[in-house]
Image (tube, helix red, strand yellow):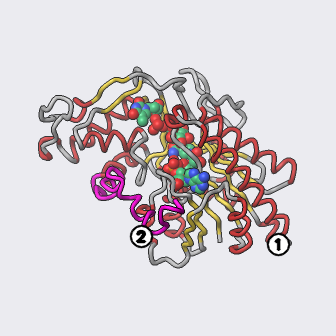
Amino acid sequence: MIFVTGGAGFIGSNFVLHWFAQNEEPVLNLDALTYAGNLNNLTSLANNSNHHFIRGNICDSTLLNRLFNEYSPRAVVHFAAESHVDRSISSPESFVQTNVMGTFRLLEAARSYWSSLQPPEKDGFRYLHVSTDEVYGTLLPNDAAFTEKTPYAPNSPYSASKAASDHLVRSYFHTYEMPVLTTNCSNNYGPFHFPEKLIPLMIVNALAGQTLPIYGDGQQIRDWLYVEDHCSGIRRVLEAGTCGETYNIGGWNEKANIDIVRTLCTLLDELAPANDRSVINQKTGAPVQHYAELITYVPDRPGHDRRYAIDARKIERELGWKPAETFDTGIRKTVEWYLNNQQWVAGVMDGSYRDWVAQQYGSKKT
Ligand code: NAD
Ligand code: DAU
């Protein structure tokens, strides 16, 4: 079995769903169910006895040691993190706690378990740390894309906490020869993306006639990858990556934020015309004709990184990985998913996705 952390979040839940779509190897899924964890992402696994969900915190060493000994995983895939840059700016502490201390505790528990193994289990064990391109800092317009050799220069409390965790993981290979792998991926998009992030926020706001807030001049560039392609890249690194190495994962899809939002508006005009849905501009009270009318420029994010771009040639060359989706196919699928899953969206927006947690675990344990 494999041990996944953060498997009720955006990428983690996509990873677990795709894992079971490909094979039956059991998954131990540990997630604290913070505001970002949503068990509705995993409802299709309700009757899958190979999915073992545990609500718990990666900072809890006692729990981690118990889980390693009880489930004897052959690998760890570590997604759990505080992931939203804006939240890291207003409240950085939980980022240090989860991303740095949590990763440290998970590494320690994994090391203790791995040290107790005998060959061949010991040689086959893998610890895959899921990280981000944001650790490399920001690029100028003509700079070459980030490679695995680009020096770290994180600019937000989020990226600094992820950089710290990457360094800890690296040190466990060099010091203890623990079989670790690190992936650094660009911006993901796709199903189950929490609507605090750019793409789902814009879709949800547009359909509700709310403004579409563009930070600063909207010319910041992100490099977008469909989430399923990120998951296939992680699976590939897990099965064939060289221990101690890092792999950048990206789709060669650099886009300015304002262009992303305009693309979303155009797709929504086609797939869910505002006229047909009687969408009202919540600010002016006027009927919306085209969703782009809702675009509003707002003050910039402090320390906002201007450009990210991933050079993905290493994983392509060494592991033969390539994304399956282009940006055009992936973004259309994403918009269609949000239109077809309004109940999921409603559950997030009215907070009812948390009700199950309260029922299941009670207020004392939350
Ligand atoms: P997310 O915020 O959607 O999900 C994080 C999950 O971790 C949630 O289910 C949450 O409940 C859980 N979690 C948080 N703190 C925890 C703790 N202390 N113990 C146990 N579980 C905890 O994040 P995401 O966007 O799915 O990102 C997953 C990973 O991928 C993160 O490590 C992130 O840094 C990395 N990453 C994200 C992107 C992206 O575009 N979203 C890109 C590259 C890398
Ligand atoms: O690059 C990978 C990273 O991508 C991940 O490590 C992070 O976990 C993930 O959250 C994401 O970080 P970003 O800050 O790039 O994503 P976000 O969706 O918050 O913002 C994308 C861009 O859009 C960014 O330049 C800020 C801008 N933005 C965002 C929001 C929420 C807006 O202009 N308006 C908004 O309302």
Question: Is 201 contained in the magenta span?
Answer: no
In this rendering, does residue 256 appear at all? yes
Rendered image quadrant of residue 294: top left
Q: Quadrant of the N terminus?
A: bottom right
Regarding residue 228, the answer to whether it shows in the image is: no
Q: Nearer the viewer, residue 6 or 315?
A: 6
Tags 1 and 2 touching, CB below 8 Å: no
Image coordinates of residue 234 in percent, x first then y, are 61, 55
Residue 248 x %, y %: 63, 43
Left or right: residue 85 compared with residue 283: right
Asked if 341 appears above or below 48 in the picture, the reply is above
| Most foreground residue, 344 or 148 | 344
Q: Give the residue type that dot 1 points to.
A: Pro
Can you say whether 206 is above or below 103 in the image? above
**Picture residue at 56% right of the left edge, 64% below the top:** 55
272 or 356, nearer to the observer: 356
> Which SS does the magenta portion mostly show?
helix
Give the CA separation, mark 1 to mark 2: 34 Å
Q: Judge left or right: residue 60 versus residue 54.
A: right
User: Type of residue at label 2?
Assistant: Ser
Q: Is mark 1 within 8 Å of ligand 1?
A: no
Q: Is residue 305 left or right of residue 294?
A: right
Instruction: Give residue 301's position: percent from left, percent from top.
Output: 47, 26
Q: Nearer the viewer, mark 1 or mark 2?
A: 2
Residue at x 49%, y 64% (from the top left corner) = 17
- Residue corresponding to mark 1: 120
Q: Residues within 10 Å of mark 2 (few under 14, many from 20)?
A: few
Closer to the camera in the image, 310 or 180: 180
Magenta-span inclusion, residue 358: yes
Q: Which mark is residue 44?
A: 2
